[in-house]
Image (cartoon, coloured by chain):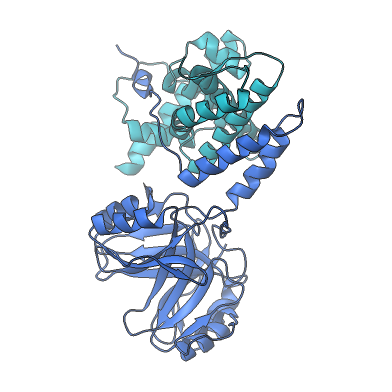
Chain colours: A cyan, B blue
Amino acid sequence: MSGQAAAGSDPEGGLLALYDRTLPQVYGYLLSRCGNRAEAEDLTAETFFAAVDAVRGDQRVAVSTPWLIGVARHKLVDHWRRRGREERELRAVPTNEAFEDPWDVHLDVLAARRTLERLGPHHRAALTLRYIDGLPVPQVATILDRTVHATEALLVRARAAFRRAYIEHEADDA
Amino acid sequence: MPDPFDDLRTPIVPTEPDPVFAARLRARLERAFTLPKGATVSDLSIDDRQSDADLARQGDVVYASLWVPDVGRAAAFYGAALGWTYGQEDSERSRDVVGAAPHIGMWQTHEAHTLFLCYGVNDIDAAVDRVRDGGGQAGAPTREPYGVVSNCVDDQGVAFALYALDASDPTPRGPLNGSRHGDISYITHYVPDSARTRAFYGEVLGWRFQPGRVEDGWQVEDVAPMSGLAGGAQKAVVVPMYRVDDIAAAVERVRAAGGTSTDPAQQPYAITAECTDDQGTRFYLGQH
C-alpha cells in the first residue's frame, strides 16, 4: 500500500502523505537529470501540481511513485523542449557528421554529466532518457513524441554530439 | 565491446530538497485542494513559482558590510566613485547605503579591509552547530531589530554572520549580478586554502562548487549575488564587484576620488576593472 494515493475518500490527505514520502525521490530524480537546483525545484512543483490535478479530476488515477517519476520525466522533457525552441534561433546549425566507429572508453561520470549539460536540449533529452534513465528506444520515442525511426536517428546524432563535446572537454582539461 | 554510453545509467538517488522549499510547496499543494472543483492549479502554480524564485535561499548573501579603517572617508569616496548615498547614521562607525541590492553597509574597523558577509540560513541553530562542528566559532543567535543573527568566524579566521531566513516573513532574493548602478554584482573570496573553504561552506551553507576558469578558481553554484572562490592567497579577503552603467566614466571617477584602477578589460561575463579605494580596499567594477 505504500507510495499510493488514489482519488478515494481523502484525496488531499493521501496526496500530502505521498508528497512527504516521495518528495526526495522526485526531487532527486530531477536534480540529477537537470543539474540545477532552481530548475529541479520548479519541475518538482509542476510534477506535484499535476498530481493534485489528477487526484482532483474525474479520472480515478492511482498516483504512485512510478507515476510521479513518469510525470517528472515528461516535465523535464517539456522543459528542454521549451529551451530548445528558445535556443534554436541563437544556435548555428550544428555539423552532424556521425562517428560510427567504435568508441572504447570508460566515461568519467562527472565529466559526462558536464558534457550533457553543454549539449543542445534535444540531444540532452534523448541521451538522458535512453542512457541516464535506461529506457528502451520505443519508450523514448513515445515521450519525445517521435517515431522510433526518427528517435534512433536523433540518438545517433546525439551520441556523435556528445562524443565530440566530451573529447573537447577532456582536451580543455588536459 | 560494451557501449560506453551504458556507463551513464544513473539510478534515482533520493535527495532532500531545501526544507524551506519543501514546506512552501506542501502549503501550496494544500491550498490547491481548496480551489473550486474542476479548476486546475496550473495558473496558481506559475504565480507561486515566480514568487518562490524571488525569495532568498540558504547560502545567499542577504547583507554585506564593507570594512574600512575610516568610515567617513570611505563614505565620501564611494559616494563620489559610485554615487552611493547613505541613510541616517545610527553610529559614527557605520553607514547604510540607500537602495542597494543586496543591502550594503559600512563598518569602521582596523581588523581587515574586506567585505563582511551575512548569509541566509534556514535553521540558524543547526547552522551554528555546523559552524562549530566545522572548526569555526559561532556566537549564540541573537534577535536584532532586522532579524535573528549569529556572528561567526570560519576555520581560517574569516569573520561572517548568519541570518535566519523566516518562511513567515520571507526575505526577497537579491539579483544575481546586481540590477542597478552601485549594486554588488559579483563576490570573489580570495583564500589561502580553497579546499578547506569549500569543505567548510559546503557543510555550513550547502554551497556546491564548479571548477572555474582559472587555476584553483571555483564558482559557487546558484547563489545570489554570484560568487566565486580563488585559492592560493596569502591572506583571506573578500572582494566585491560593483555594477556600473558606464565603466569608462566610473574608472575616471575612481581615479579622480583618489583610488586606483586598471583600464577596463573585456571578460566573458562583463567589462571589468580592478580598483582600490583611497584607503587601499580592493574592489572591481563591472559593466554587465
Question: In which quadrant will I find the C terminus of chain A?
Answer: top left
Residue B274 figure quarter: bottom left
Whether residue A64 sits left or right of residue A163 in the image: it is right
Instruction: Indicate left or right for B124 with B257 as reference.
Output: left
Image spot of residue B280 (x, y percent):
38, 83
Q: Is residue B252 above or below residue A21?
A: below
Instruction: Determine the image quadrant of residue A91.
Output: top right
Q: Can residue B38 be seen by looking at this rendering?
A: yes
Foreground residue, A172 or B229? B229
Q: Horizontally, is B182 left or right of B138 in the view?
A: right
Q: Quadrant of residue B192?
A: bottom left
Q: Above or below — where is A8 with respect to B184?
A: above
Q: Which residue is at a point 55% across and 26% down the rendered structure image?
A: A72
Residues B252 and B77: in front is B77
Is residue B215 visible in the rendered image? The answer is no
B115 and B78: which is toward the camera: B115
Residue A164 horizontal/vertical position (percent): 42, 30
Q: Residue at x 56, y 37 (%)?
A: B26
Q: Position of residue B180 (x, y in %)?
A: 62, 67
| Number of numbered discs visible in the structure rendering | 0
Asked if residue B252 is positioned above or below residue B72 in the image, the reply reads: above
Name the foreground residue: B234 vs B63.
B63
| x then y, percent, for residue A69 | 51, 22
